[in-house]
Image: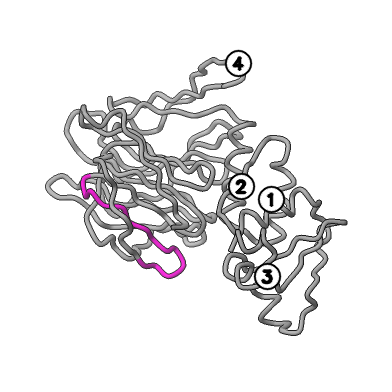
Amino acid sequence: FRRMREAGELIDIILVFGNKEVPCHKVILAGTCEYFKKIFLTSPNVSTRIPITGVNAQTGIAIVDYLYSGYIDITTDNAKDLLQASKLFSLVGLIQIIETMLCDKLRPHFATQSFSSTDNCYSYDSRKKAWTTLPPMTVTRQQHGSTHHQGAILIAGGTDGNGNGLYCKSVERFDLGTNQWSILPPLPHGVLVPSVVSLSNRLFVLGGHLGKSYSGAIYEFDFKRNVWLARASMPDESWCASAVAFDEYVYVINGFSYKNLRYDIHQDSWEEIQAPMFDHCVSPAVVWKGKIHTLGGHKEEEKNTMEVLDPQT
């Protein structure tokens, strides 16, 4: 469709950003953007030219290219305009990507030691190239899961630091604005190396090690009721996996299951997607330029590997 748009083939709608006309296909706009889907479904006789106010030509073209390709180049110069346009078009996944980028630019990076029992926490200021010691966690732990969620760092699970081998079910929250820790209700059970993901203002804890078995469970925190709710379990047990949020899905990458899984947060359902070529257990995964990049692995021969997963294909 992108090539057809560039060639002007079967064009049936034109978006107007200022003085710039951008030819498009209704089926692509409706299939990738709820904003346009509602327009076309509620107004079947809508004009073939739709003026878009409040979005400049450069930003409008970038958004349309994103709807067609799933790729967008976000810089410090265009991030605010893209964020405003993304909110206008209700592009939740893109909003999250841009807000995360802006937070990373404005806020020091945060780190907790994970593979030795500690309550130490640090932040790294990439501008000053310096580390700062932060208030310690309320629970000494290791091999926990963590994520950024609504201006805070969430820490879940792990093992306690008392040397008794107990798995933690405690969850705590570090407010990046006040530099203070607070305690959330505990998970239903203790878990080692769970995956923790924030998506569309929702918080999920997935999988992990239970001691004598692995977990395929997924829990979502209900902020209104202040409780953890069980969601549809993963098709396979998973631990030491990486989990990332992209668009409206949670992707669980490899781990000891040697599989890639995708979770639909709205349908509460799982599906298995293309398997990885390498064993990326205990490896980081990150969303960059519309694709999921997974690096390294715990095996010596796989430490220098990298795979790229295109969620659109």
Q: Kindly identify which residue carries mark 4.
A: 128
Highlighted magenta segment, given as a residue range? 256-269
Q: Is residue 54 magenta?
A: no
Within 10 Å of disc 4 (Cα), the crowding (few <14, some 14-19, many 20+) is few
Q: Closer to the camera: disc 4 or disc 2?
A: 2
Tag 1, which secondary structure?
A: helix
State how far apart marks 2 and 3 are (Cα). Answer: 19 Å
Find the residue positioned furthest to the right.
19
Q: Position of residue 28 (x, y in %)?
A: 60, 68
Query: Mark 1 or 4, which is nearer the eye?
Result: 1
Spatial CA distance of label 3 from label 4 is 44 Å
Residue for badge 3: 36
User: What residue does disc 1 label?
Assistant: 62
Camera-side residue: 73 or 261? Answer: 73
Instruction: Calculate the distance from the C-alpha at mark 1 to the C-alpha at mark 3.
Output: 16 Å
Above/below status of 146 relative to 199: above
Q: Is residue 8 above or below residue 112?
A: below
Q: Quick one: 221 or 241, which is closer to the camera? A: 241
Image position of 177 (left or right of 60): left
Kindly state the secondary structure of the residue where label 2 is placed.
loop
Query: Which secondary structure, mark 4?
Result: loop
Looking at the image, do the residues carrying marks 3 and 4 touch, with CB atoms under 8 Å apart? Answer: no
Which residue corresponds to the image point at 26% horizontal and 39% vertical from the top-left? 281
The residue positioned 62% from the left and 51% from the top of the image is 95
Mark 4: amino acid:
Lys
Residue 275 drawn at (x, y percent): 28, 52
The residue wearing badge 2 is: 72
What amino acid is found at the position of numbered circle 2 in the picture?
Ile
Identified by mark 1, the residue type is: Ala
Disc number for residue 151: none
